[in-house]
Amino acid sequence: MTKMKYAGIAVISLIVTVAALLVGKKLFSDNKGKALTLLKSNEKIVMNGSSERINNRVLIEKYFELHGYSPLWTNKSAGKAQNRNRLLSLLVYADSLGLNSSEYHTGYVLLYDSLVKLENFEGSETETETELIFTDAGLSFLYDVAYGKAVKRFSYEGVKCRIDTVKVLNLFHELVTSISPASILDSIEQQNLQYRKLKKVFQKFNTSLSQPDYKEVRIAEGAKGEAAALTKLKALGLLTTGSCSAGEFKSAMLEFQKMISADTTGVLDAPTREALNVPLAERMEEIKKSLNYWRWTNRVPDKEFILINIAAARLQVVSKDSLRNLSMKVIVGKEDTRTPLFTAYITQVITYPYWTVPLSIAVKEMLPKIKRRLKYLDDNNLQVINSKGQEVNPSFVAWSRLSKNYFPYTIRQSTGCDNSLGVMKFDLNSPYSIYLHDTNVSELFNRKNRHLSHGCVRLEKPKELAHFILDNGPDTVQIPRIDSCMKDQKPNEFKLKKRIPVVLLYMTADIEETGRLKFYKDVYGLEEKRK
């Protein structure tokens, strides 16, 4: 990314500050009170009609408390010029990381860096404001690289996150003293292999999009459509040239179909055309969001945690510096009974659990079937429990009087191999009646669309997940290594000494375990609608 491109950002709005920057006498070091007042005001910094929003006021104040209020950026000395150059060299990475450089005052930094070189420059009157803007640019950028932006979609955050602000502050201080920007990024950026591969893909797409001759083409049916498809396949990195043999074209098409989890026919069919017609810029936006999700996971303090990508309907155990060899398909909520985005801990494991049917399912789905045929309860091993927790004989229940507005019972499925929760349940400390569990309908994992549940997460490999949790140490006794379903078992609860974090995200772009880039269908419609 060139300085010329950055210089174009907000230059018109910032040029009005020139007059203010050319006059004045005050020194920043004598203006601590003004700096603190500006930081606590929570208003934009306004200078002669131009304004800049400070991103991270708390972090700036901590930095000044730790390293003092000395000016770092705002005079003609060679040292300050070197500081500005280091900052600009850092900010130049923003767009390649899927961040927006304009959010880090790049236009202002470039304009000031140009003005300060003028012979008659005198900017002491707005020195305090400029110091705050420059400092905020570097600190907020490093913070976002290390920990990502807040995930507004989380409906509940039960995992206690930890942000090492001192590390961010010290690395920023080193930026203005000695260490190169590239070294600083390497030391603070997410080390997960999936993140690093996703970043490379993003940069590759960005290179394709930046080519002077690149333009989006509409892929239609027939030979013209195949010719247009070549352009997109090349931009996606699946072809190296704009022309190829029939065999190379089919091979690239197969790779793209795997990328979007479509039927691998190698033919430019309707679903493939629709996916190829998604503009490259939109694909990059999907990757941007996923990069931020991965950066956000640096806030989870535990060395390992469970990540569930709802869009992909997949679970994996993530190690901070690698991908642990444990991943599996899952079944998550369908569109009208969605699995929410949240964080929580696995607090206990229950073997041979009862399934307490949620009231909404009991009255909407089961009650009409029970009224038509009472034997429905026996056929599905369902018990009727009264308000005292006692099992009652369903023959003595006046089912015709019950409705969604009056249902003083609980429906519970007895334990066993046919239980909807299977032989294992993993409780979460969330406000939802959502947990991870086994299932007695394993054939559903063969489907490409696995958004099928009422919100809970069904596991393809529950026993393997239990073994992972076992390695982290249950409280008093070990969880039995269940390798087959046994009859007539009672529920057994195992509290854990160490709670296991679970993070449920929604990434429509990610790197799967094989290292392949994957785009997933936006089943819940959470992404912006494509034009």
Image (cartoon, rainbow, N blue to C red):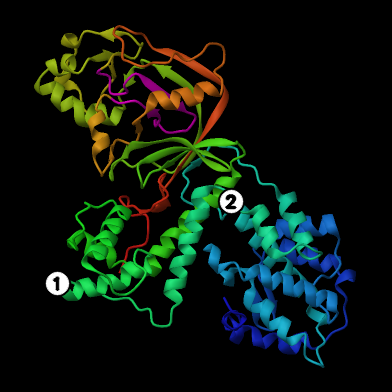
Indicate the position of residue 524 as horizontal and vertical percent values: 32, 50
Q: Residue at x 75, y 50 (%)?
A: 166
- Vertical arrangement, residue 151 with respect to residue 376, above or below: below
Q: Secondary structure at mark 2?
A: loop
Disc marking residue 433 = none
To which quarter of the image does residue 527 belong? bottom left
Residue closest to the far bottom: 120
Is residue 53 something one can see in this rendering? no
Residue matched to label 2: 190
Is residue 300 something one can see in this rendering? yes
Label 1 vs 2, first from the N-terminus: 2
Which amino acid type is marked by label 2?
Gln
Q: Residues within 10 Å of mark 2 (few under 14, many from 20)?
A: many
Residue closest to the far left: 372
Residue 202 located within the stretch drawn in magenta: no
- Between residues 413 and 187, which one lies in front from this camera angle? 187
To which quarter of the image does residue 266 belong? bottom left
- Between residues 150 and 96, which one lies in front from this camera angle? 96
- Between residues 249 and 49, which one lies in front from this camera angle? 249
Indicate the position of residue 168 as horizontal and vertical percent values: 71, 54
Q: What residue range appears in magenta?
A: 418-439
Residue 431 located within the stretch drawn in magenta: yes
- Vertical arrangement, residue 510 with respect to residue 174, above or below: above
Indicate the position of residue 45 as horizontal and vertical percent values: 69, 73
Residue matched to label 1: 222
To which quarter of the image does residue 7 belong? bottom right
Which amino acid type is marked by label 1?
Gly
Tag count in the figure?
2
Q: Is residue 457 left or right of residue 51?
A: left
Q: Quadrant of the C terminus?
A: bottom left
Q: Main secondary structure of the magenta part?
A: loop
Q: Residue at x 62, y 39 (%)?
A: 301
